[in-house]
Amino acid sequence: MNLTLKIWRQTGPSAKGAMHTYPVTDISEDMSFLEMLDVLNEQLNARGDEPIAFDSDCREGICGACGLMISGRAHGPEVTTTCQLHMRSFSDGEEITIEPWRADAFPVIKDLVVDRSSFDRIIQAGGFISANTGAAPEAHSVPVPKPAADRSFMAAACIGCGACVAACPNASAMLFMGAKITHLGELPQGQPERDARVVSMVSTHDHEGFGGCTNVGACSDACPKEIPLDVINQLNKDLRHALTHGH
Amino acid sequence: MATNTLPKAGPVTARRTTVFMKLLMALSGALFVFYVLVHMYGNLKIFGGIEPFDEYALHLRTLLTPILPFGGFLWLFRALLVIALVAHAWSAFYLWSRAKGARTTRYVAKEAARVTLRSKTMRWGGVALLAFLVWHLLQFSILKFNVGSGAVNGSEGRLVISSFQVWWVVLIYFIAMVALGMHLWHGVWSASQTLGWAVSPRARARAQATATVVALVVSVGFMLPPLAILFGIVKGN
Ligand code: HEM
Ligand code: SF4
Ligand code: FES
């Protein structure tokens, strides 16, 4: 298939970027979206042009490194990650715009690569449990009800890709945070730090410059791991409880 | 990759978060929802004639009277509404400006980061409601001016009937009630989510259905008296 790509190019963090047009030909429908970009980069390399910078690591949908705004949809038209998106989801002759995630808390490093260390700082602020190392307790000594384990596991599927922020009209990271709050809050091990966790994570989130949530729901629609909107409900509820507990 | 830690601005407390702002918005919004439901019910009394309507207005002033002075309850409730309005508008503009600052470089693709139909008109619709509120209060509460030609003689009911015999007054109210309906369509569901009542997919569907019903009941219920007056069904004699 033949395609016209409009791609954001930006040489560095403070450089001014712009959209550039690249035609690509003879693309197989079985290629992944990133393989299609690899083909384009080989052609650019052969011509002596600077290849397009984009993030990827596992290329199997589990690391969250890849993430592109493809024709206005985070990770493109399917519910999956960009690396697991295949060219058969597009039609021959299509024009595709490719942009980096847009949020001031995710500054562009180069071309399509953004710096998501604001997510790491949110996790550092509270997305953990404290446990003694060395003498690990017997896992079965702390029973977890099946529904709680299931809900926790569902929320733990978040890969931190940032599509929720990219798709949100407020550039809010509540779905990402709500997933972590729900993941740890459903487990007995998550209880001692539960109040402090939500307050500290939300404070860091706000401080990093993400927007506030207005319950639009675009995040959940864009999430490759189908994290449901009710994790944000959980976050709101946990913050309200923390408030009544004097935090 | 090692990450650096930014210094925190000020103390970390729940009261300084965007989620707290949303709580303020939800609680003040919930008070408005209660208020507009009661207000709408009161307006429907015009279908019984001028007397029941004026009597209802009097009842609002005599509520809890042996304990409070005449009109006391009404003034307390008004004070509460004003506080709620300030909290509501303040949190709304705060979140609005934050959202603008959170994405200063926009997407090229028009489809990106768009709001849903349900939540589309919250911000400008909210501003429209604020403008309407000023007009509405001047017309029926503060100045009580009569744009129609009917006799009023100090009767609330006669003022209402005379006013809504004028087509453009009805049009203003019609536009405002569409805005209110849209606001509640997203607002009631959004407040449920903010207050933590939409904890499962089923509860979420229920909250969204409730929002649709409240929005329809309020906007249609408010529009019935003006339309009935305009088309001569309610004449007030
Ligand atoms: C007077 C002018 C008003 C302004 C400027 C205003 C503005 C807003 C804004 C900007 C939002 C946030 C929307 C979002 O989530 O993106 C909001 C939410 C809301 N509004 Fe209003 N509004 C007004 C009046 C009202 C009235 C009269 C009612 C009720 C009858 C109401 C009920 C609500 C509710 C329930 C919410 C949802 C709170 C939440 O998100 O948790 N508002 N308003
Ligand atoms: S919640 Fe979904 S969209 Fe957001 S970071 Fe996690 S996996 Fe990505
Ligand atoms: S490269 Fe790991 S999720 Fe796409």
Image (tube, grey):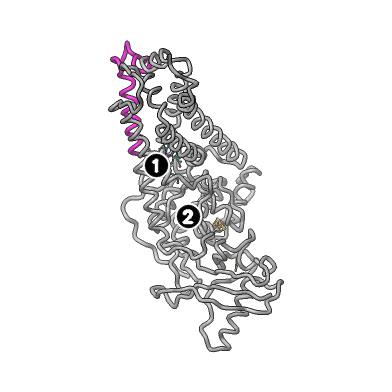
Instruction: Identify the mark at residue A169; answer none if there is no mark.
Output: 2
Find out if the beta carbon at label 1 lies less than 8 Å from the nearest ligand 1 atom. Answer: no
In the picture of the structure, the residue carrying the numbered disc 1 is B128
Q: Write the residue at 67% across / 70% down.
A: A87
Of residues B17 and B126, which is closer to you in this image?
B126
Q: Based on the displayed image, in which of its 4 quarters is residue B74 positioned?
A: top left
| Whole-number angstrom distance, CA of label 2 to CA of label 1 | 21 Å
* Bounds of the magenta segment: B59-87
In this rendering, is residue A184 above or below A114? above
Q: Write the residue at 51% across / 71% down.
A: A112
In this rendering, is residue A74 above or below A142? below
Of residues B3 and A14, which is closer to you in this image?
A14
Q: Check disc 1: other Cα within 10 Å, few if <14, some if 14-19, many if 20+.
A: some
Q: Is residue A87 left or right of residue B34?
A: right
Magenta stretch: dominant SS?
A: helix
What kind of residue is marked 2? Pro
